[in-house]
Each structure stands twice: as structure tokens, then as C-alpha cells.
Amino acid sequence: MILIGERINAGFKDIKEAIVNKDGDVIREWARKQADGKASYIDVNLGTASNKAEDLCWMIEQVQKEVDVPISIDNNKPSMLKEAIPVCKKPPLVNSTTAVEEKLDEILPIIAEHGASIIGLVMDEAGSPKSADKRVENAGKIVAKAMEYDITPDRLYLDPIVMPLKYMQDQAKEILSAANQFQLFSDPPCHVVCGLSNISNGAKHKRLINRTFAVMMIANGMDAVICDVLDEELVNAILTAELVMNKEIYADAYLEAFRK
């Protein structure tokens, strides 16, 4: 499983304050914690704390001072990406683009030039789709356009757009169905990813809902997830689901082996 650590995000008060005050210690501490939690990528999200590329680059630099885990750049502005991607020591994952053709034609050339990877949100001009069929249709547009720029399936992550269970309960089945069908676009298939915490937004039993939905998504093809990598019960559930799906070799000490 590709684990994308979500915590260096200006939506969190301590991260926003760290950006404003240029307190690299906070950024580096969260980078280390998530690396120790076995994050495959560390997401860096400037959010509303700033609109300056130099601040995004500073955040990336702070992470890279502490760990050698690749960066997920949580920004979709071409001008920002052109400055931020070259700062990355390893090819980054860019989070994200939509299926809108103009947006794809802005971002995908940058991705192709730098050998980066990209998350494609399956939304279009009409916004987030409500049905599995529309999600699959939009995903197909992203895949086709990525192929035009020679971006291979291993560098393309399709996100079915997770909706809060509390407010849009009917959407969960549509998301699972779409994720399952994303695997049919290519061989080998593109990655399937989601922002897991969206499913429990506003709910009381957040961690339980996150764990359950993660397992169900893995059963439907998800192999990457933006999540709290420090939630041990969540990660254990993810690892166990991968065993059940025969994606990993069983060993009695599989949990211990992962953390070592």
C-alpha cells in the first residue's frame, strides 16, 4: 500500500502557524513522525496560509532536511508547480488535477517534463459526480489525456472523490463501484487513491468509519491512500486487507515486519 501522510497541511493550526512564522521545527517534526510511520509520500499542503511559491518550496525543503521520503505536492496551480517540482529531490506526486480538458493540458505537460506522478480527481466542469458511471467516464478522460503525454499507468492515480458518509450516505456504494472499474482502463492498471478522512467528515466514530471504508476500498482496487499514517489501528487494518486480497505474503509477524 502506498501511504501518503496527510499531516503537513495548513488546515491544521500548528502547520499554518509554522508557515506564517517560518518555524521549520514543526514541519520537520511532522515529517519525521510520518516517515517513522512508514509513509510512502509526505503530502505538503500550503492551503490558505500563503499563495507564494517560495513558501511551498520552503515547506518542501524543510521536509527534505529531515527525511528522504518523496513529496506529494498538494497544489494544482501550474505556476506553483513549475517552481516546486524542481525543488524535490525525488520525483514527486502532484495532488491533483481534474478531468477538465483545459486543466489537464496545463498540468500534464509539467508532469511529463519532470517525470512526476499525478492524482486525477474524477470531477469535471459540473463538479463532483454523483454516480459511479460518471466517475468512470471522467476517469477515462484523464487516462486518455495522460496517454497523450506518455504518462504511464504507474504514474497516474485515480481518485473517485470520497464524500462524507454522514451527509451523503448513498455515495459510498457509488465510490466503491467506480474504484473497482478504474482497474479496467489499462494493464497494468493505474493506481486507485482516495483522501480517506473525507468519508468520516462530521461523523462521531471517525476512526472506525475510516478503517472500515479503507478495507472496503482495498477490496475494490485501492492501492494508495491519503491518511493519518500514525493511526496504528488504521494501518493494521490496511495491511490485513492487503493480505486477504493476496497482495502480500502471509507471515505471523506481518505487522511487526512492516514496522521494521
Image (cartoon, rainbow, N blue to C red):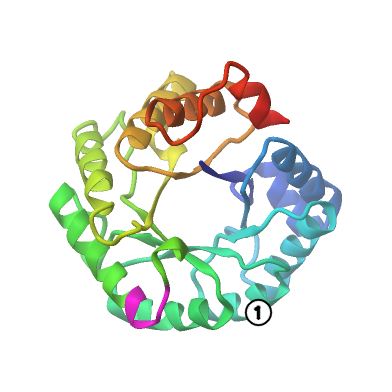
> Is 150 inside the magenta-drawn segment?
yes
Local crowd size for mark 1, using a 10 Å CA cut-off: few (<14), some (14–19), many (≥20): some
Q: Which residue is mark 1?
A: 83
**x, y percentage for residue 203?**
40, 25
Comparing 22 with 35, the one in front is 35
Q: Tell whether 225 sits left or right of 133.
A: right
Q: Quadrant of residue 166?
A: top left
Which residue sits at x=33%, y=82%?
A: 148
Q: Quadrant of the C terminus?
A: top right
Q: Position of residue 168 (x, y in %)?
A: 24, 35
The picture places residue 189, in percent across and down from the top left corner, at 34, 56
Compare residues 138 and 199 and report the one nearer the observer: 138
Above or below: residue 67 compared with residue 149:
above
Determine whether the residue tagged by mark 1 lies in a helix, strand or loop: helix
What amino acid type should be assigned to the residue bearing mark 1? Glu
Q: Is residue 56 left or right of residue 115?
A: right
Give the total number of marks visible in the rendering: 1
In this picture, which residue range is highlighted in magenta? 146-151
Q: Front-most of 222 and 105?
A: 222
Residue 258: image location, x then y, percent: 64, 31
Viewer-side residue, 22 vs 218: 218
